Image (cartoon, rainbow, N blue to C red):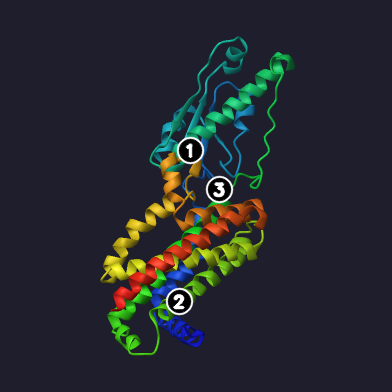
Amino acid sequence: MRIANIGHLGIKELRGFLREPALVILIVYAFSLSVYTHSKAMPETLSKAAIGIVDEDRSPLSLRITTAFYPPYFLAPETITTSQMDTRMDAGLDTFALDIPPDFQRDLLAGKHPTLQLNVDATRMTQAFTGAGYIQSIISSEVSAFLAHHRGANDMPVELALRARFNPQLNPGWFGAVTSIIDSVTMLAIILTGAALIREREHGTVEHLLVMPVTPFEIMVSKVWSMGLVVLVASGLSLTFVVQGLLSIPTQGSLALFLAGTALEVFATTALGIFLATIAGSMPQFGMLMVLVLLPLQILSGGMTPRESMPDIIQWIMLAAPNTHFVILAQSVLFRGAGLAVVWPQLLALVAIGAVFFSIALNRFRAFLK
């Protein structure tokens, strides 16, 4: 092995990458606009939902309920009449319409069980699905606090004080931005190395490499370090300028430790990309393989759903995937401020999985060149 050969071949790969505008645009989009949109448009986020309230009770309790809806989850409630409810919802002015009936407070204090009516515009699926739960929780909280005040403190001897760690505002945008970077690192590391190898085949330059005094190991390492460098630099810039700068999302841990974990993740996934490229005969086939491999990796790695909520067998199987350990490492470092003493098992797992993937891909790559 000659280091000079690996360096020169890697520079060649970088030049080839810069001559592919589609790949350059993909990198820029994935680590900038995609991160921004994931932060601002999380599917489960309730943001600035329009609500109208028909207050037929005009009591302190109904006023308390009305003033409990405030930004950023809701717009300031509009006080409307019963006749306006359907008209405003038909016009799309309100997503929710809450009707507080007459004598609501009196019936509640008398021990009765009065009912509130909530109309929901279900054509706005995202807000309708989560907003109804938010409204129910808010009303229950306000009614409980009101009854506790009027019936005395002895009826409510225990008060639960909630403290949210690492994300005090419970802002899902923080989670969405970091998760987008994690997913993009895995996806683009596979795409760039796989596309680089398939591009060599389609342009006929593989034969040129075979007559040169270079080994398959040198060729493969050059693709790994060059495409991995692109992903590593792009992820670092995205975290610094988009997440911390543009979105003002605080990151608790060491950026150097995160980039070290990213480098190991890139090492494993670029080897996986080369392996998939040796199986695929063309870019369309490579794209189909990407769908079959990438979707399970991203869905079952713990980035979208906590691993603890998955079946035990899935958790054990996904320990063989590099991005499972990368998700744990990235979330621990960036969200919780964990140091090397906490995430060293994930670093060792990424080294081991990367070495296995690299060995398998290298054997396949040697057979591919023959």
Q: Nearer the viewer, mark 3 or mark 1?
A: 3
Query: Number of numbered discs present?
Result: 3
**Badge 3: residue crowd in 10 Å (few <14, some 14–19, many ≥20):** some
List the residue tagged with mark 2. 221
| SS at circle 3 | helix
Using the numbered discs, state the Cα–Cα distance from disc 3 to disc 1 in whole angstroms: 13 Å
**Badge 2: residue crowd in 10 Å (few <14, some 14–19, many ≥20):** many
List the residue tagged with mark 3. 172
Location of residue 186 with respect to 142 vertically, above or below: below
Which of the 4 quarters of the picture holds residue 162? top right
Q: How far across and how far down the image is residue 116, in percent?
A: 51, 22
**Amino acid of disc 3:** Pro
Task: Please give left or right for residue 130 compared with residue 370 in the image.
Answer: right
| SS at circle 2 | helix
**Amino acid of disc 2:** Val
Q: How far across and how far down the image is residue 129, in percent?
A: 44, 37
List the residue tagged with mark 1. 130
**Amino acid of disc 1:** Thr
User: Which tag, 2 or 1, sits closer to the chain's start?
Assistant: 1
> In what quadrant of the picture does the C terminus appear?
bottom left
Task: Please give left or right for residue 235 compared with residue 249 in the image.
Answer: left
Task: Please give left or right for residue 109 compared with residue 315 in the image.
Answer: right
Q: Nearer the viewer, mark 2 or mark 3?
A: 2
